[in-house]
């Protein structure tokens, strides 16, 4: 019998491809919280710090090891320093779509594409026309709901007891209130929290504070 | 009239707990794979059968799901779940969702220290909330 082979923790991993600057951080934190709340593991290029790999190799490994991926193509502005846009997010979206199309064992991969406006992509990346793009208008509540709804219809493991988007957002707000206190207890700077540490605090909060 | 072989629902029947592991064993999925529409066992990812159409695959999957008293998930071409069918025998309940630990260890503190800090803050916040409610 044929077997559909998959990498380790493939089924529960979500690759997050988004800008990593300070202005985007609230949305990134919202996405991470929603993913953890939906019983899945967020993975970012930031989380891997192995100097023995090229950056592109790290990204390719991440894409290959995650069944789900979230791409936020909202950051299209020109960089004020050099006047050029950043292409990393659309490039990695292309790699992910290519992996699904040509990669053996990756037919089941699913992706969520986020933007500030649902139809804005037509002006700068019209080749993805036909794919569903969800809008978030730069709001954390919208991004959490978009991620939650998408995972609800993509993942089978969590479909039975998934909380609603607004319920997850309410919990996220409570978590944000408690975050400075928790950071103080472990001597962390809440304004410079690495992605992995944020994920661990959020994970512990969700498990120890079951709504 | 009900047949004598029909399953009789007991008045105070307790719902059977289905663990996540068990749920995986009871799940069959239908999706588009290399050869066509396949029925795949979620537990060992074994392709049970391959069909030319989604409807045929769903029919086969449905029969297998009924046989094992499990569930069938039918995915569309885009990979999203289109249909969920449940064939549990009797009332069931599920394990509450628990967040999975991140795949990379924390950088600036141990997992134990983070857990302790979170628990302490939750305890303090709950105590404060209880006092306010008094």
Image (cartoon, coloured by chain):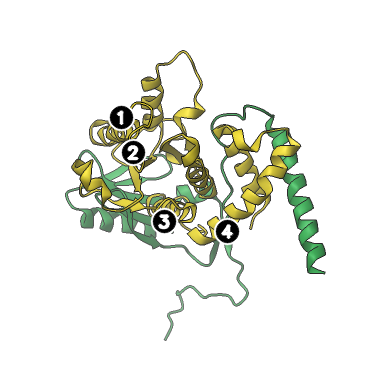
Chain colours: A yellow, B green
Q: Earlier in the sequence, mark 1 or mark 2?
A: 2
**Spatial distance from mark 3 to mark 1, Cα to Cα?**
34 Å
Q: Earlier in the sequence, mark 4 or mark 3?
A: 3
Q: Element at badge 3?
A: helix
**Spatial distance from mark 2 to mark 4, Cα to Cα?**
31 Å
**Spatial distance from mark 1 to mark 2, Cα to Cα?**
8 Å
Residue that label 2 marks? A77
State the mark number for residue A149: 3
**Dots 1 and 2 on the same chain:** yes
* Mark 4 neighbour class, 10 Å CA radius: few under 14, some 14 to 19, many 20 or more: some
Label 2–label 4 contact, CB within 8 A: no
Label 1–label 2 contact, CB within 8 A: no
State the mark number for residue A84: 1
Q: Earlier in the sequence, mark 2 or mark 3?
A: 2
Q: Nearer the viewer, mark 2 or mark 4?
A: 2
Residue B96 seen in the figure: no
Residue that label 4 marks? A170
Q: Nearer the viewer, residue A91 or A60?
A: A91
Subunit bearing disc 1:
A
Q: Earlier in the sequence, mark 2 or mark 4?
A: 2
Subunit bearing disc 2:
A
Say above or below: A62 vs A107.
above
| In this picture, residue A148 sits left or right of residue A208 | left
């Amino acid at each position: 019998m044929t077997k559909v082979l998959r990498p380790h923790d493939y089924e529960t991993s979500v690759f997050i491809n988004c800008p990593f600057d300070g202005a985007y951080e609230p949305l990134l934190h919202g996405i991470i919280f929603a993913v953890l709340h939906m019983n899945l593991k967020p993975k970012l290029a930031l989380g891997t710090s192995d100097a023995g790999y090229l950056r592109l190799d790290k990204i390719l490994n991440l894409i290959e090891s995650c069944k789900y991926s979230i791409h936020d193509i909202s950051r299209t502005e020109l960089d004020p320093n050099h006047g050029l846009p950043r292409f990393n997010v659309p490039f990695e979206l292309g790699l992910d779509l290519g992996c699904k199309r040509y990669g053996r064992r990756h037919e089941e991969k699913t992706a969520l594409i986020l933007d500030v406006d649902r139809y804005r992509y037509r002006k700068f990346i019209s080749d993805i026309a036909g794919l569903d793009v969800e809008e978030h208008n730069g709001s954390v509540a919208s991004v959490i709901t978009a991620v939650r709804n998408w995972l609800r219809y993509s993942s089978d493991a969590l479909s039975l007891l998934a909380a609603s988007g607004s319920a997850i957002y309410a919990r996220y707000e409570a978590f944000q209130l408690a975050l400075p206190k928790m950071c103080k207890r472990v001597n962390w700077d809440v304004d410079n929290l690495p992605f992995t540490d944020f994920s661990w605090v959020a994970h512990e909060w969700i498990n120890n504070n079951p709504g | 009239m009900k047949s004598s072989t029909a399953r009789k629902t007991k008045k105070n029947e307790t719902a059977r707990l289905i663990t996540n592991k068990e749920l995986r064993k009871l799940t069959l999925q239908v999706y588009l794979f290399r050869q066509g529409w396949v029925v795949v066992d979620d537990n060992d990812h074994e392709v049970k059968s391959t069909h030319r159409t989604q409807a045929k695959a769903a029919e086969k999957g449905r029969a297998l799901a009924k046989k094992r008293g499990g569930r069938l998930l039918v995915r569309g071409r885009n990979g999203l779940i289109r249909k969920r069918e449940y064939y549990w025998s009797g009332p069931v309940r599920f394990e509450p969702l628990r967040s999975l630990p991140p795949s990379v260890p924390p950088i600036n503190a141990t997992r134990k220290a983070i857990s302790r800090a979170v628990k302490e803050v939750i305890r303090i916040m709950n105590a404060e909330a209880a006092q306010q409610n008094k």
